[in-house]
Image (spheres, rainbow, N blue to C red):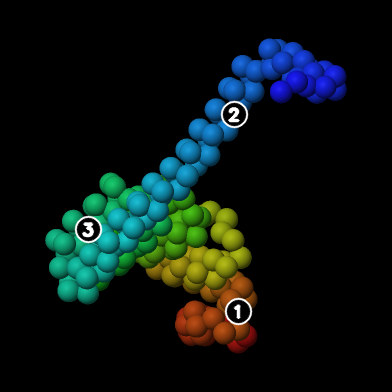
Amino acid sequence: MAYDLEEQEQLATFKAFWKQYGNFVVTLLTVVLLAIAGWRGWGWYQAREAAAGAVVYEQLQVAVQSRDIDKVKAAAGVLFEKHGRTAYGPMGALVAAKAYFEAGDLKGARAPLQWVIDNAAEDEFKHIARVRLAGVLLDEKAYDDGLKLLAADPPARFLTAYADRRGDLLLAQGKAAEARAAYQQAVDKAEEGNPIRRLVQVKLDALGGAQK
């Protein structure tokens, strides 16, 4: 089929363009396709990891409910090693730490909480772990270490928890005035319906703090 003059000019222009930029276009297209394939592959990998992590997390929950510390350790270890990058890693660490703490194993409780602080991708998990680890250090009478742990600048939603735990540590050191100030900050920063507010108010009242 013969081309008219305009079509021939367009074809000649395209050939010239392709001769000059063809390799670049092919390379660019290949990179884009590989990126799309990689993104889809990564999404599939993440979904698979999350599903696998969910199974182990469920096993951990069952172990906690049955108070089987050996199984708690085994399931938590698998979560840290194989699924630590999923949300189930830090979630499982917090659950395991609570199980150890309730079993009286303070040293065992410290390790998963520190793991969350060092490895969790979400800051929320890290702040929860800091407050809980400070509580463990309180029971171990490592008051200065607990206070150092709470020296971080938390977001607004964690100010009450940080101030409350700081008050506990200061009170344990015999620093009643500083503890009172920390408890007062916890009350001031807590929302009206926050159940922690009432508990902190009891502590504050016991120290002679002003009623809020």
Q: What is the distance, in whole Å, between disc 2 and disc 3 at their CAs?
A: 45 Å
Mark 2–mark 1 distance (CA, rounded to whole Å): 54 Å
Q: Nearer the viewer, residue 94 or 62?
A: 62
Q: Are marks 2 and 3 in contact (CB under 8 Å)?
A: no
Which residue appears at 43% of the width and 42% of the height?
A: 41
Q: Which residue is mark 2?
A: 29
Residue 26 vertical position relative to residue 91 in the rendered view, above or below: above
Mark nearer the N terminus (2 vs 1):
2
Disc ID at residue 208: none
Q: Which residue is mark 3?
A: 75
Residue 176 point in image, percent of width and height:
49, 72
Point out the tag, 2 or 3, that comes first from the N-terminus. 2
Q: How many marks?
A: 3
174 or 52, nearer to the observer: 52
Label 1: state its secondary structure: loop
Labelled disc at residue 191:
1
